[in-house]
Image (cartoon, grey):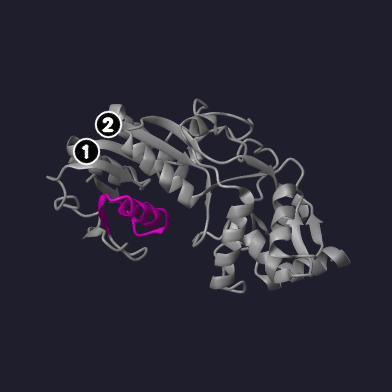
Amino acid sequence: MKRTLILGGTAWLGRELAGQLVQRGHEVTCLSRGSSGEVVDSERFVRSDRSQPGAYDEVRSEHFDEVIELSFDQRFVQEALAALSQNAGHWTLVSSISVYANEQQPGADEEAEVHDPVDLSDYAHAKVAAERVSTAIVGERLLIARPGLIAGPADPSDRFSYWISRLALAGDGQVLVPRTKNRYVQVIDVRDLASWIIDGAERSLTGTFNIVGSSYSFDEFLHLSSTIAGSSGELVTADDAWLREREVNYWAGPRSLPLWIPTEDLGFAQRSNQRYLDANGLERALEALLSDVLADERARGLRRTRRAGLSRSEEMQLLSELVTGA
């Protein structure tokens, strides 16, 4: 029986990893504070605050076939490596495509330039630093997974799920959208991501991989979402400048239009996934992913308060201003 340690593991991706590992017969240990979610059945939970001394004492002397690191905090990553790397057969760092310095080159692969990690309070810089220290210590045993936008049921970020839930809520009503020309959506299902990471660990895969699906035009994504949601309402387009003047934000967070990015960042949702596909990467059909997400959104409530996007009342106000020219 393989023994796997997840550093983190009670939040969304961590729970998915733990659940699939248990199903595959791994002996799974999760080391975390346990503040982000419940522990998976049959998983051993080690409650530990990684910011405190002795955080790894309970597992320091144990051998693990696999360690999966989810953090972007360089201190956590470095201290875990110091405490555990000698007793780990294989090490996986879950990084991010945010590490890339240039978002303007469609089709760029894993060899593209990354940020110079000068500001470790910045997520992208911190992930680069985590990659470098991990490579220095366990490079010959290291798998670096760089996911893009992660989606799927129970997504806590509300980014990908915003559009299909809003279209379902609107029904035959209008929905506010940004200009879609030269904008794309690229996503990976959390279930496929977790499965591939586990596969990689089981076969001791090493190297760096962009974990992303195929790129779809934003227009194609919206129209497929409309079809699946059963929405017959008009998609009302607003210019970037108009939206920004009204403090509508890019990408994520409150008062945003999720997945909308500046037009100059053409490469952001068009990363190469060839290396991932060549390494048996999974790519769930977009239609299947959207259908699963909609079912989850209906169960959670289409009118719930969301972490990303416009509230329906905010959207209706903006639509009124757009129509009247206010």
- Is residue 205 placed above or below 180 in the rendered structure? above
Discs 2/1, front: 1
Q: Residues within 10 Å of mark 2 (few under 14, many from 20)?
A: some
Type of the residue with mark 2: Val
* Residue found 38% across the figure and 40% down from its top: 199
Q: Which mark is residue 108?
A: none
Q: Secondary structure at mark 2?
A: helix
Span highlighted in magenta in the image: 7-32
Q: Which mark is residue 88?
A: 1
Please indicate whether residue 164 sits to the left or right of residue 17 in the image: right
Residue 317 point in image, percent of width and height:
75, 70
On the question of residue 162 being in view, the answer is yes
Q: Quadrant of the rendered structure where residue 42 is?
A: bottom left
Please indicate whether residue 98 sits to the left or right of residue 89 in the image: right
* Residue found 54% across the figure and 43% down from its top: 283
* Residue found 87% across the figure and 67% down from its top: 324
Q: Quadrant of the rendered structure where residue 291 is?
A: bottom right
Type of the residue with mark 1: Ala
Residue 95 point in image, percent of width and height:
42, 41
Please indicate whether residue 319 sits to the left or right of residue 156 in the image: right
Q: Secondary structure at mark 1?
A: strand
Mark 2 highlights which residue? 138
Magenta-colored stretch includes residue 37: no
Q: Residues within 10 Å of mark 1 (few under 14, many from 20)?
A: some
Magenta-colored stretch includes residue 27: yes
Q: Nearer the viewer, residue 247 or 194?
A: 194
Asked if the residue at tag 1 contacts the one at tag 2, i.e. Cβ–Cβ closer than 8 Å, the answer is: yes
Please indicate whether residue 132 sits to the left or right of residue 240 in the image: left
